[in-house]
Image (cartoon, rainbow, N blue to C red):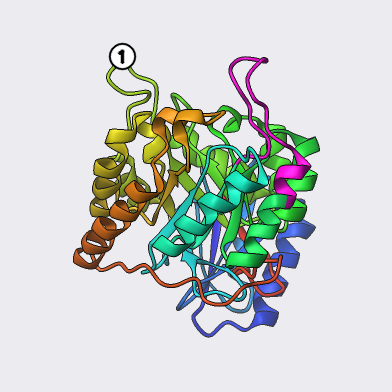
Amino acid sequence: MLVVMQAHATEEQVRAVCQKIESLGYRAHAMPGATRTAIGITGNQAEIEQGTLDEMAGVQEVIRVSKPYKLVSRDVKEENTVIKFAGTQATIGGKNLAIIAGPCAIESREQAFAVAERVHRAGAQFFRGGAYKPRTSPYSFQGLAEDGLRIMAEIREQFGMKIITEAIDNESLALVEEYADVIQIGARNMQNFSLLKRVGRAKKPVMVKRGLSATLEEFFMAAEYVMSEGNYNVVLCERGVRTFADHTRNTLDLSIVPAVQRLSHLPIVVDPSHGTGKRNKVTPLSRASVAVGADGLIVEVHNQPDKALSDGMQSLYPEQFDELMVQVRQIAAVVGREIVPIGTVASLSSSVETPPDTRMATLR
């Protein structure tokens, strides 16, 4: 269910409704909007008597939500979620187009800094790199683990870019949460429900990548797992799905971008590198992603892709990324988006929009 508060409802009234919901054994999730606060209710296996809540001070109406995903839905929050970071103008969501770039894996300090310098110069606000690599083969490069995280922390200090990197299990999550600004959940872990619950209790924003064959509803439900634990700063990422096509690594499903934006308030970025697996297709699909309305791009860039230890075939050379940025800026202006500078070097922690004292509403 969803409790919609009146426009003039006070924080005390919102808090009282949340406390009432929790006294009934459910969980309340308060999501302030531009004109109202909505309170979602989760954990309710049976119908809550509407009269229990709709007579409380400040309540406008109580609505039954039929969608299986509650907190992800625009029913609970009409305005788009915008994730902000301390010390920089960069955001994920809103008018700003988030540009996330870097190598698939952190291979060495020299390699990481060479790539970081180039993508920073081209205008990327976020640096991506894998310290933990879930590989198909157990004999493939698995990442530098905490050494890789330390290198990315140095890059943030020097260039001011925020860091996005993947946690592959609960053990790695503890370290990733310590070092990163955004925690990535990879496609293979989109339905790792224990990991999703754990990252839902993290204090950092989370980017959830779409699974290899996930439907839109399954994609939303993965984000719902995170949000149901209290972390409402979630970014969705389309990275291609497995189909019969053999001319690309995956099939990049750009139709999911407007579908997500119609049903959900969460930002969605596109990964044209994994979505195609071919270097010569990354720039064209980046252009298309921006044109269709994506909130950002996550692109793999390597200074020596032919020698990369992971995904070299889909990694751009730095000069190709420079040209991609020129083209993306032109298209962004046409669709009313812009790429803002990263601003000053920021501290390790990120500042995200979170509800004041209350928690999000519980839905059924």
Q: In this view, does 60 lie to the left or right of 328?
A: right
Q: Is residue 329 left or right of residue 52?
A: left
Q: Is residue 44 left or right of residue 211?
A: right
> What percent of the width, then of the height, locates residue 116?
53, 55
State the count of labels: 1
Q: Residue at x 54, y 29 (%)?
A: 310
Q: What element carries label 1?
A: loop
Quarter of the image for residue 93 reads: bottom left
- Work out whether 265 lies above or below 343: above
> What percent of the width, then of the height, locates residue 323?
28, 53
Magenta stretch: helix, strand or loop mostly: loop
Quarter of the image for residue 172 reads: top right
Is 29 or 201 nearer to us in this picture? 201
> What percent of the width, then of the height, locates residue 1?
56, 53
Q: Which amino acid does label 1 sit on?
A: Phe
Local crowd at mark 1 within 10 Å, few (<14), some, or many (≥20)? few
Q: Which residue is drawn at 27% across and 19% down?
A: 247
> What percent of the width, then of the height, locates residue 28?
67, 59
- Work out whether 292 lies above or below 31: above
| Residue 68 seen anywhere in this rendered image of the structure | no
Q: Which residue is drawn at 59% across and 61% down?
A: 162
Quarter of the image for residue 252 reads: top left
Residue of label 1? 244
| Residue 108 seen anywhere in this rendered image of the structure | yes
Q: Is residue 208 magenta?
A: no
**Residue range (magenta):** 130-150
- Work out whether 39 lies above or below 185: below
Q: In this view, does 16 lie to the left or right of 4?
A: right
Q: Residue furthest left?
A: 334
Is 336 or 25 nearer to us in this picture? 336
Is 71 or 233 nearer to us in this picture? 233
